[in-house]
Image (cartoon, rainbow, N blue to C red):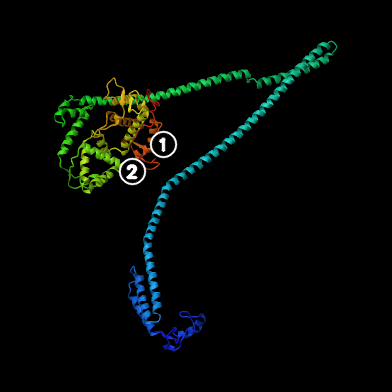
Amino acid sequence: SFQLSARGHWSTWPAFASRQTVLRNHKPCCAPEERQSSNKQALLTIPKPRYLEQLESYLRKELQSLDLTKKNSQELKLQPYREIFECIIDNFKTYKPLLSAIKNEYEVTLAHQKKTIRTLEPLKAMVTTVSEECTQQILALQEKEKDEIKMLKQEKQHLLKFIDNMKEEKNSLQTQVEHLRTSVAEEYGRYLDEYGARKLLLAKLNDMHNERLDMTRHQVQDIKGEDVVKLTLALKIARQDLTKAQVKLNTVIADYGDVVPRRDFESLEKKYSDLLHKMKTLQKDFDQLHKEYETLLEIHRETAEERDVVCAELQQVQRNCTPRPNWAKCSEVIPGGADRWGCLAEGKTSDQLVDVLLEEIGTGVLKEMNVFPGWGKDDKVPVYLRHEGEVKNKKLTKKDVVNILKDVWKEKIALEQQTGKRSSLPEFFLSYLQNKYGDAAAMEWSYTLYENMRLCRSNHVLSSFYDILTGKVGEEQYRGQNQLISNLQKELAACDSSSSGSLTSKHAAVREAFPLKRKESIQELVDASRYKLDSTEDLIDYVSLFKEDEEGNAEPFVAKLRNQYVGEKQEYLRQLKNKLGALTEVNADDLKTAFRTIDPDIDDQTLDTYLGLAYQVRREQPDQEVVSVETALERLLAGDVRRVGPSPREGSTTGFEGE
């Protein structure tokens, strides 16, 4: 053990080695600096205490036996030091309380630091996560803005080139102006010279004429007194002057022989202006007539095509026509008898009656089925039908199916408004059934609803949901029809100033709501709204026109409106196909040109939407995309495509009447 001095102080090495004591007359645990230099040489010759060597040997063995690759290696490494420190405390009884207090304080501090570290570890993970998310967002924003920056740079280069071209054009024009100014100045100088020369010539001619008159007069007065020689000389000089004057006169006549008098020039200029104005008027009339001729030629071509199609359909019908069946016999086998069959068959064609009959037979067979065969779990199977084995038939009524599908639409629209993102109908359909009926029963409801939708094609709610679910049409078409009907309801309510819920059939509300419809289409809607009225009644309850029965069947007015929507879209795309002509493939520029030709009022945003439907892309410039004409038309037919402005050959309106 360590040796103590007579006064109880520690020595730097044990006293048994040299029997010297140090650290006298100073505070404990504090060695003066001036003593260090004097004791340093002495300490080098003193051997280590045995106890110290034992402790160091024990520490080395313990440290070598530790596995420092573990996660808590630092705590394991601290344990041997803690044990040696406890041994020192136990051996030094005098300092044991102080050393124990120091040890406990360190232990408490270490425990507090460990607790603080454990508290901060989740914050560190959260900070790391937030930092990664921020980095990803920054990279996403940089990637998003990269295309825009690239486009702006291209636009900048284009504008710089345009500015350079304009500067070059400006310099060229300035050069031309300077050249013209120089030419005009030269012409004006020549004109002034000729004008001065002409005045001088006239003055000389007048002077010569006056001199000749004076000379003649003097000759007459002095002829008797003058000498013959003098007269002869004067005559010779006069003849010379006459010759010179004749030469100058001939020169003037030669120089100014082609000059036109100002009066004749002004008269001719006026006639030229009148003829030019008439020519421009005739050219304008000719251009207008030529444009009308081309329009009439296009109308004639389209009419000829329609005539050929109608003739072909007529021949096909004439070949395939059969005697009209007695549809009243169906009332004997349809549940509900003649009354129900009369309601089902009212206002329907033979083709539609066949669909109704097949639907009734199919629903009857469907009610007798207890289970459906599963379609399997292949990737080609829709996600809402992926099931192995048999699936129980829930045997739902048409009313139940309609209510469920309406609730699906309601939940889907609410979710999209909440999240601001569009969701896929097949995936949402399965998710809805799982959330409402559980994962186990979701497939039973899915198969039952699917089979009912597949069979009930005459019901708009079921057929439209089925077409969108199977991808035959886009969801935008369903939303577009609903928006069309909603806008019409608002327009009719706005025209009803008395809020009575009724309007006359002559009211212009329908014409104002659909300014692009033909008169025949407007009249069809008016007739459909009057189907319950007598011929003498004229007041229409417009609120009841938009009601549905418990199976989701709409009134004839709404059904006619939906049929017109489909027919107008087909007509619009038929005009687009005719404008594309014999093309088998079409790029974005050609399709834009065709759209703007048949619909001049179409705006850029709507045109980009239609191009996105045709090319199935989400970028600003699909210029390099090329698809077949048939594929583009099929994709447009599945989406919400409508005419924006009036047809070029129909004018702005079709002459709708007011009240």
Q: Mark 1 = which residue? A: 604
Measured Cα–Cα span from mark 1 to mark 2: 26 Å
Which secondary structure, mark 2?
helix
List the single residue furthest toward the right: 225
- Residue 309 is situated, as x and y percent measured from the top left of the image, at 28, 26
Q: Quadrant of residue 456?
A: top left
The answer to whether residue 581 shows anywhere in this view is no
Number of numbered callouts drawn: 2
527 is higher (above) or lower (below) than 163 = above
Query: 10 Å neighbourhood of mark 1: few (<14), some, or many (≥20)?
Result: few
- Residue 622 is situated, as x and y percent measured from the top left of the image, at 38, 41
109 is higher (above) or lower (below) than 152 = below
Residue type at mark 1?
Answer: Asp
Decide which of 521, 623 is in the foreground and name it.
521
Q: Are marks 1 and 2 in contact (CB under 8 Å)?
A: no
Decide which of 434, 70 is in the foreground and name it.
434
Q: Mark 2 = which residue? A: 416
Decide which of 652, 156 is in the foreground and name it.
652
- Residue 214 is situated, as x and y percent measured from the top left of the image, at 79, 15
The N terminus sits in image quarter: bottom left
Q: Quadrant of residue 104?
A: bottom left
Q: Earlier in the sequence, mark 1 or mark 2?
A: 2
599 is higher (above) or lower (below) than 132 = above
Residue type at mark 2?
Answer: Glu
> What residue is drawn where x is 53% and y is 21%?
276
103 is higher (above) or lower (below) than 356 = below
Nearer to us of marks 1 and 2 is 2
- Residue 625 is situated, as x and y percent measured from the top left of the image, at 36, 41
The C terminus sits in image quarter: top left
> What residue is drawn where x is 34% and y is 44%?
418
